[in-house]
Image (cartoon, helix red, strand yellow):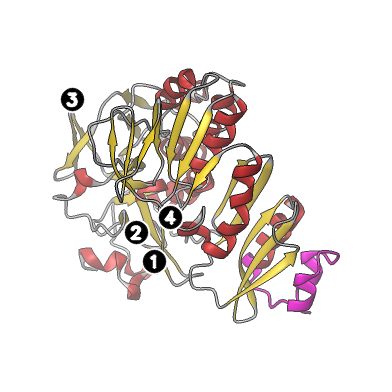
Amino acid sequence: AERGDQVSAASLGDPANAVELAPPERIVVVGGGLAGLRTVEELRAQGYAGQLTLIGAESRPPYDRPPLSKRLMAGDVDDTSLRDELGSLGALVRLGERAERIGDGVLCTDRDEHPFDRLAISTGARPVALPGPGRQRFLRTLDDALTLRETLVPGARLAIIGAGWIGAELATVAVSRGCQVTVVEAAQTPLAATMGQEIGALTAAWYRGAGVELVLGQAVESVQDGGLALAGGGWLAADEIVTAVGVRPDTAWLESSGVKLDNGVAVDELLRSSVPGIYAIGDCAAFWSGRYGRRLRPEHWDVALRGPVTLAANLIGGSERYDPVPYFWSEQFGRMLQYVGDHQSAEQLVWRGSPGGERWAACWLTGGKLVALLAVGLPRDLQQGRRLIESASLVDEGRLADPAVSLREAART
């Protein structure tokens, strides 16, 4: 196969098109987050006994990110590290070392060169910063979270830019700690970019009910000392500013490598990049989904947890297809939101229960099949909905809309 064939539509997930590679004696995993750690764990669990190196840009050992905006920010825990799992893996662990480029069979970092037969890229993503000379904080790393938590004191004026998942979770914690919280969002509703305005509009009242000032339809021109310069000439004073407008895959170091980039490292259904022997997983990987017919790059914990099972198998010669049903959850303003699937190209939205109430769900259909579900306070619906999506079962719309009927029973027989 040609080098580019591994990410072409004709060869996606087809082992017959894979480049034949010798069994790996040296595997390097670059990216010291959960996805990198889980890849190392799975390689050992699946019997790989060769040389294994884990390289992480942060000086901290791998840690869980979801608790950073939840339990850690609330003060329930001080550390989410997974360091205990490292010692028994028989891997060379290099922390505080940043990848800079890929040579011919070698990963070059800011400290050393690491030869490899296979390379697994899991370098994650970086938060987007806004223009301006003022101090803007982010909530991405454990150090970010610990530093930010110290600023959440009673009476502090906190401005959060972005009413997405992280913005909502941070606002939830900050107002509970006595801060004066203002969330500024350029779109007309919260969650507009991910859930759409119809869904997002249902969450706006949650902010106000919690005592958070929500400013919608307002772009930020720049971050200044002491506040935000708003588009149109307005000003919002703030003691602390957190920018939560999204992340971008950490792949700039790969731009001269020959690895194809397409909103991240473009990989096929076997998680292979365009360069033989190089694979990717996690927030930095845009994988081809046969289920949804397009590339997906879910920035969620579930991918980092489960994806390495498939990646490890393929690193050591397997041909397992990776086509998960994406899943994530968010805790905001006393509510649990759980989402499964992908609704970007869905044809129809069916409401389950009373939208805007305490317990409801949004169901997206394509061709009479459930392709995505957002459940608010309905964990059983989430579990059963995920099974319906995985099985690609046809559903009865009337039964789907009736909360008295279980989602399992909405499947057509």
Q: Is residue 316 visible?
A: no
Crowd band around label 4 with a 10 angstrom C-alpha radius: few (<14), some (14–19), many (20+): few
Q: Which residue is mark 2?
A: 267
Q: Which residue is mark 1?
A: 15
Residue range in magenta is 389-413
Asked whether residue 406 is drawn in magenta, I would say yes
In the foreground, 113 or 364: 364
Q: Which residue is mark 3?
A: 111
Q: Is residue 110 left or right of residue 397?
A: left
Q: Is residue 15 left or right of residue 338?
A: left
Q: Which residue is mark 4?
A: 217
User: Does the residue at mark 1 contact the one at mark 3 (Cβ under 8 Å)?
Assistant: no
Pick out the residue farthest to the right.
404
Q: Earlier in the sequence, mark 3 or mark 4?
A: 3
Q: Earlier in the sequence, mark 3 or mark 2?
A: 3
Q: Mark 4: which amino acid? A: Gly
